[in-house]
Image: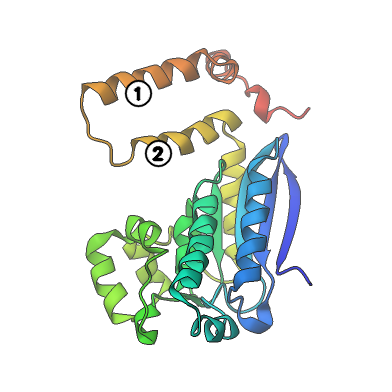
Amino acid sequence: MNSTLDIQRHDLAGGHVATVRLNRPERRNAFDADVITELTAAFQALAAEDGLRAVVLGAHGKAFCAGADLNWMRAMADYSWDENRADGARLADLLWTLAACPVPLIGQVQGDCYGGGVGLAATCDIVVAAHEAVFSLSEVKLGLIPATISPYVIRAIGERNARRYFTTAERFDAVTAQRLGLVHEVCTAEELPGKVEALLQAIAANGPQAVRASKRLIHDIAGAVIEPALSERTAKIIADVRASDEGREGMRAFLDKRAPAWQTPQ
């Protein structure tokens, strides 16, 4: 079986970046069981890599991800309830694996992003999209609902916007996606690689462990009730970070007016 993914790596500030691209341009990068399996395994492996600074999720061809593959959908039409439950669980596991990536995950969206493709984008920490990109939560057109992707999409665009786009299945452009909170930056297709590279360079300038800890902090604190116990918890977290080797090096470098060790070529 040919791989449905194209995975490449390049060096970045004493570490490396992985770029994972969906590689089914002839199918508009629609996903099926094989894509889900490969993508889950790829991100599980990346999560364990030492020196990983960031991951870029993109796609080859004109579309980012057109949602579910038609042939896969034809097969699903005859699934039993148990088969549908197991199938949904595999997609849910993929989305969680993406969202739990320990380093920043940058989505690079160059074209159509429909259905589950929106779910992929919503798991990313940062999304840059080309002006030509078009988005749609199109499930209700097929008599379905965006159940599995909903935790990530609602977190990205908010409940109020989800009430509209989950039920209308309207298409919306990249500028609208940015206004909704799904996309952070919009540019031309030609500018897209440069915008992503600039984000990678910004990440590389920061403490590697602090970046990872910031992702964990957001996951742990977002939505938490602000109360004395939370204040005490965050005080302990900052104490741990300040007392770490990287935290001490960062503060000393700042006071000494020099570049920290992670910015110095080895």
Whether residue 161 appears in this view of the structure is: yes
Earlier in the chain: of badge 2 and badge 1, it is: 2
Is residue 124 depicted above or below 3 in this figure? above
Q: Secondary structure at mark 1?
A: helix
Q: Secondary structure at mark 2?
A: helix
Which residue is the site of mark 2? 218
- Residue 224, how many percent across, how many down? 27, 36
Q: Residue at x 67, y 23 (%)?
A: 261
| Observer-nearest of 190 and 2 | 2
Q: Amino acid at mark 2?
A: Ile
- Residue 95, how many percent across, how many down? 50, 57
Which residue is the site of mark 1? 234
Asked where in the image residue 122 lies, by quadrant, the reply is bottom left
- Residue 210, how many percent across, how many down? 53, 29
Q: Amino acid at mark 1?
A: Thr
Asked where in the image residue 69 lies, by quadrant, the reply is bottom right
